[in-house]
Amino acid sequence: MSINVSPVSVRAPQPPRMPDPEAIRRQRAVTKRWFMSLVVLMALVSVGLIVWVFFIAKIKDATAATLAPAANLTLVLAPILASAAGVERTLETVFNIIENSWKSLVAYLGRGLRWLNSAELEVDSARQWLADVSARYNEELRSLEIKDGMSASDLSSEMQDKIFAAKTMLDLAQNRLDDAENNLANVTASDGYRSAKAAASIVLGLILGVIVATLGQLQMFAMLGIGTVPAPVDVLITGLVIGSGSYPVHSLVGILQQTKDTLDGAKGYLNRLGTPFTAQKTTEVKPTSEEPGAGQKVVERVSVEPTEKPTPSS
């Protein structure tokens, strides 16, 4: 009986090599130019949207809606709520694509390009080392010659030690790769990038909101029964509300609903106070009982009714 076990030996991974400082400076300059171009583009688009809404787009004056006293503003403003949610999901998708495919811009706004290059090199080195360890682990398994009829008690402690050492090395390589990838994924966790992302989300959200409101002819004031606001101004304000996000829109609807309910209640109370009433006295003589010769009694009734019926609140 012979068992051949080759010694466990793993090629040491090559140390990561950072790009030279000149290459990093060129990469930083290119990324900066892209970033400034995006800032200028968003500014031009914002100005162009205002010109489009007020002078180019054919916006029709919407008829002011008549709201019932018990109207639910969540249903009245449902198109605006749906548009705000759609804009929010669109922004999330756009930033997910940018964070996964344009890490140089993310790093430029956050941890820096030198950190990004170091993290990417560590990931590449960990992947190569894992591939080498996996290949070596498979070689160790193939090199074991176990003849037919060999029982488990015949396995030598040396062979078991070699298998355990190869498996331990494989686990270490996998852990190193996981740590390197998690470190690279944290490129979006820096305070600088989060601040820039929040500012960009606000600007892009407002731009998309105005576009959606203009294309959909959404006029929030007309939906609320206010017909004195010019249509372009109504569309612009509606677009800004949509672009602020679904949570601010829900909060605004809640505030408007409470205000409307309060005003409707106050209006109904004032209508009741200002309604004149008329009192009418009715006198009726009835016998005290149905027996013959029973005495009679006088019954008086007083009814109060409004002289003029109050008009329903609109």
Image (cartoon, rainbow, N blue to C red):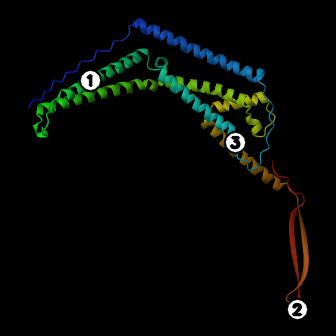
Q: Quadrant of the N terminus?
A: top left
The answer to which quarter of the image holds residue 57 is top right
In the rendered image of this protein, does residue 22 appear above or below residue 78? above
The answer to which quarter of the image holds residue 135 is top left
Q: Residues within 10 Å of mark 2 (few under 14, many from 20)?
A: few
Work out how far the residue at label 3 is from the one at label 1, CA to CA, in angstroms.
67 Å
In the rendered image of this protein, does residue 269 appear above or below residue 59? below
Kindly give the residue lying farthest to the bottom in the view shown.
292
In the rendered image of this protein, does residue 78 appear above or below residue 53? below
In this view of the protein, which residue sits in the foreground, 160 or 313? 160
Give the residue at mark 1: 135
Task: Give the mark nearest the N terminus, 3 or 2.
Answer: 3
Q: Residue at x 64, y 37 (%)?
A: 82
Percent x, y of residue 39: 59, 16
In the rendered image of this protein, does residue 213 appear above or below residue 19? below
Q: Secondary structure at mark 1?
A: helix
Work out how far the residue at label 3 is from the one at label 2, CA to CA, in angstroms.
67 Å
Percent x, y of residue 176: 31, 26
Give the residue at mark 3: 256
In this view of the protein, which residue sits in the foreground, 106 or 122? 122
Residue type highlighted by circle 2? Ala
Residue type highlighted by circle 3? Leu
Work out how far the residue at label 2 is from the one at label 1, CA to CA, in angstroms.
121 Å
Q: Residues within 10 Å of mark 3 (few under 14, many from 20)?
A: some
Asked if residue 105 lies left or right of residue 53, the reply is left
| Residue 294, label in figure | 2
Kindly give the residue lying farthest to the left in the view shown.
1
